[in-house]
Image (spheres, rainbow, N blue to C red):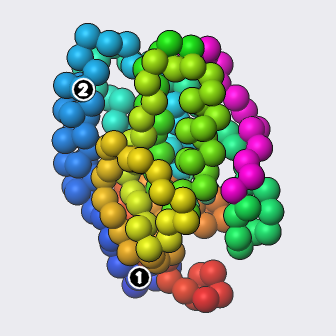
Amino acid sequence: HPEVGGDLVRVVVSEEEIRSRLGELAARIDEDYAGKELLLVGVLKGAAFVMSDLMRRLTLDVSMDWMAVSSYGASTQSSGVVRILKDLDADITDRHVLIVEDIIDSGLTLSWLVDNLYSRGPASIEIATLLRKPEAVKVEVDVKYLGFDIPNEFVVGYGLDYAERYRQLPYVAVLAPHVYGG
Ligand code: PRP
Ligand code: MN
Ligand code: MG
């Protein structure tokens, strides 16, 4: 299986750092939404791991839903135009919505998603993301719950993939250039 020294260069965020930080974020979310019903909206597929681990730390009245989206445009450069592949099951009108993501890279996916969900008339809408790459951001998105800012390197693990591989790693690591021909 993939390991540092093979496919991976180094660990950027360890399993323990993720566990500890998600606990802190969950405590803040519990406090901020006390007495309210919260809907977590995950973005398939990368957010599956954050969703699973974050949700289990919450004591709130909380439920989850999922969206699947796809970016149009050239493969290397996202156009910011997004297509819905799977929409929410839930009607979010007047509901408190917290979008859960694994990473904000350019910010194009989330800025589009926030606009789209906002137009449906939720009571509130906020973002929780485990990772953000400040040097890669093209569109600023307002993140309320942030795990870690990381350098602008090709990372995989804890939901993040390269060609659908490496999602199952319990940590976030830099992918070795030889794997993707870099
Ligand atoms: C990745 C990641 C975020 C998005 C961030 O998803 O999981 O959802 O890209 O990129 P952006 O900030 O530049 O928009 P991807 O499209 O690879 O799908 P996946 O979650 O199924 O891997
Ligand atoms: Mn994703
Ligand atoms: Mg991906």
Identify the magenta region: 80-92
Counting other residues with Cα less than 10 Å from the Cα at mark 1, is it few (<14), some (14-19), or many (20 or more)? some
Q: Residue at x 33, y 42 (%)?
A: 144
Label 1–label 2 contact, CB within 8 A: no
Is-magenta flag for residue 119?
no
Compared with 22, 27 (above or below) is above
Residue 33: in sight, yes or no? yes
Secondary structure under the numbered disc 1 in the rendered image: strand
Please identify, in this view, whether the residue under mark 1 or under mark 2 is nearer the observer.
2
Residue 172: x percent and y percent? 39, 64
Label of residue 9 in the image:
1
Residue 87: x percent and y percent? 70, 29
Q: Residue at x 36, y 69 (%)?
A: 150
Compared with 118, 73 (above or below) is below
Q: Earlier in the sequence, mark 1 or mark 2?
A: 1
- State ligand 1's quadrant: bottom right
Is the CB atom of the residue marked by disc 2 within 8 angstroms of ligand 1's nearest atom? no
Q: Which residue is mark 2?
A: 32
Q: Residue at x 21, y 34 (%)?
A: 28
Residue 168: in sight, yes or no? no
Residue 73: x percent and y percent? 80, 63
Is-magenta flag for residue 83?
yes
Secondary structure under the numbered disc 2 in the rendered image: helix
Q: Residue at x 74, y 52 (%)?
A: 81
Amino acid on which disc 2 is placed? Asp
**Quadrant of the image containing the C terminus:** bottom right
In the image, taking residue 32 as reference, residue 85 lies left or right, namely: right
Q: Nearer the viewer, residue 40 or 169?
A: 40
Q: Main secondary structure of the magenta part?
A: loop
Residue 44: x percent and y percent? 60, 42
